Amino acid sequence: MSAKKVKGASLSFTPIVNVEVNKEDFAHAGEGSSQIKANLLKLGYSPKAIRQVAVASYEAELNIVIHSLGGWLECGVRPGLIQIVARDRGPGIADLDKAMEKGFSTAPPHIQQMGFGAGMGLPNMKSCCDEFTIESKAGSPTVITMLIKDEG
Amino acid sequence: MKSHSVALEKGRCVGCTACIKSCPTQAIRVKKRMAFITEARCIDCGECIRVCPKYAKIANTMDLEAIREYRYPVALVSPALYGQFPLGTDSSLVLSGLIEMGFKRVVDVAQGADYLESIINGYVEDHPDIRPLISAGCPAVSRLIAVRFPELAENVIPVFSPAEIMAKLTREKMIKEGYPAKEVGIFYLAPCTAEVTAARNPIGMDERVIDGSISIGDVFWPLFNIVKGLKVPVVSSHFSAKGLRWASIGGEAKMLKGNYSTLAVDGLGSLIEVLESLSMGRLQGIDYIEGRACTCGCVGGVLNVENSYVAREIIRQTSRRIKPEMEMEEGALRWQDYQWNHSLQYQAALLLDEKPEVAMLKLEAVNDILRKLPGMDCGACGAPNCRALAEDIVQDQADQMDCIFVFRDRVTSLAEDMVKLSRKLPLSMSEDM
């Protein structure tokens, strides 16, 4: 599933962050996103782009924590363009269209009670970035790729 | 840039590295047994002053003599000052003591806090699309956002602080009464370094409205001695319990009318956590954040003399004895009349380089160096952690040998080489074939 295309997306990105994210590790959820944000500030990306990246990467990180068997959060950059990749070890999403609907959640009740898994993760990620791609099917890993343009 | 109010008294600094880890923007390095502050990063929070065991970090404030440069000096009194006096001290006597010290007029910042109520309520109502809104009441918080959280700059409410509101109103009033503008000098009796800097170099405004700042710590003892001997006040204080409580954490958040969800966060550590969460979109449903860099709020300011918890309790007790709310004679103030000239500006002080390509190369170099450092974050090199040292090395401000672990490994390997060499015999004597 893929949305609008961003120019330069096929070129290579310089990796700046690659962190492992563990299943149900709520205590450390957000650390990867925080690292990404700190690095982007050092590189001179605009506050607007950083705002989008912070939300998109945190939602992706949280999705790995809540729904997956664990995975990785990666960030790569090029001048004017930031790429966030969230990949996991599965178990995959059976119905992608349904998963993209606002408010649809498969998070178990105990996680929803903690204030997570409100069914806004994927829609939020999509609305925060300029290009959103998700590859997944039941029984296989999920890979989410997001591109955020920095127009200064 | 000489606008900062945190400075170093060189003779006292022994280079102990106590301050480097307390700095929220990693602005301090110790070199040659002396601390140095990177001005562009300093947010004037005063944490380094607080933790320095040698009292070498000092506040750059004016002394009382400065008020004599003006014919009509005005004291702008922080409500935190009332938290320094023993419980039961009449606030009007405190103000009268200041008149005795040479001020021609005394004005309460707590009254400005009373006026702030309508300003922030108006702003919150008129901006339903920005949530949460962040109070600009603590200048250290605004500056922290400008340096470390620029993505949250648009959430900061761009209006005057209570001190600035009172400075503006007082100046306008005195000019109207016929005082020559140049002869009126407005001095803020400030509880913290951030307020001192904000008076000198206002956030969001091109022109200053306060002429100078004097530390509460410098004023307190002479004032206390005068107040002890006073029986009858010559002036009276004008503020409500609400305005007074603005000096303690939660005082501003409580001013919001309507069913808003608010967070009152004190202390830089907690505040940074909250701002991180906010930045990631985690704080859904929160409408307003009152952030204060100091524990307990302004009563915890580094220039105060009393313990922040005691001062907070004195303020709380005092507020129960005075009128709960202010009756607004002139009607409520509009935020539009007390708005900044420009929004909070991003201060790109953490950049590795102005040029993005160069910054990228430097970041890669930082990560390469970081892999060779021990990751102990011990601070012995004079930088707050290994990453900061790696950045300094890349910026040519430090050397890998500044790390005592890298240095020791180098010594070990040299020593091993020496031993090997010492056993080496000239070819003529060697038994190796």
Image (cartoon, helix red, strand yellow):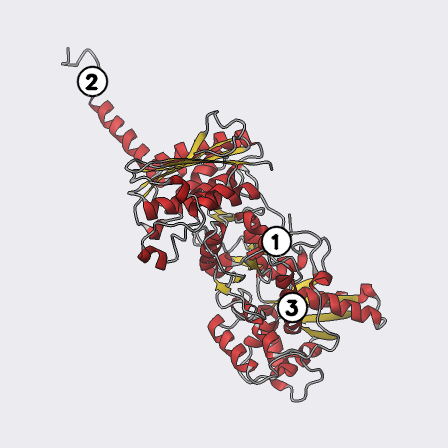
A26 sits to left or right of B295: left
Residue under label 2, please give it: B425
* Labels 3 and 1: the sequence-earlier one: 1
* Labels 2 and 3: the sequence-earlier one: 3
Indicate whether B163 appears above or below B344.
Answer: below
Within-10-Å neighbours for mark 1: few <14, some 14–19, many 20+: many
Residue under label 3, please give it: B116
The amino acid type, in three-letter code, at marker 3 is Leu
Residue B4: mark in rendering: 1
- Nearer-the-camera pick, A124 or B210: A124
- Nearer-the-camera pick, B314 or A23: A23
Q: Chain of mark 2?
A: B
In this view, the residue farthest toward the bottom is: B231
Image location of residue B417, percent across then percent down:
26, 26
- Say which of marks 3 and 1 sits in front: 3
Residue depicted at x 55% and y 55%: B9
Quarter occupied by the C terminus of chain B: top left
Q: Chain of mark 3?
A: B
Within-10-Å neighbours for mark 2: few <14, some 14–19, many 20+: few
Residue depicted at x 65% and y 52%: B343
B152 sits to left or right of B211: left
Q: Secondary structure at mark 3?
A: helix
Separation of marks 3 and 1 at Cα, in angstroms = 26 Å
* Labels 2 and 1: the sequence-earlier one: 1
The amino acid type, in three-letter code, at marker 2 is Leu
Are the numbered discs 2 and 3 placed on the same chain, yes or no?
A: yes
B185 sits to left or right of B257: right
The answer to whether residue B31 is visible is: no
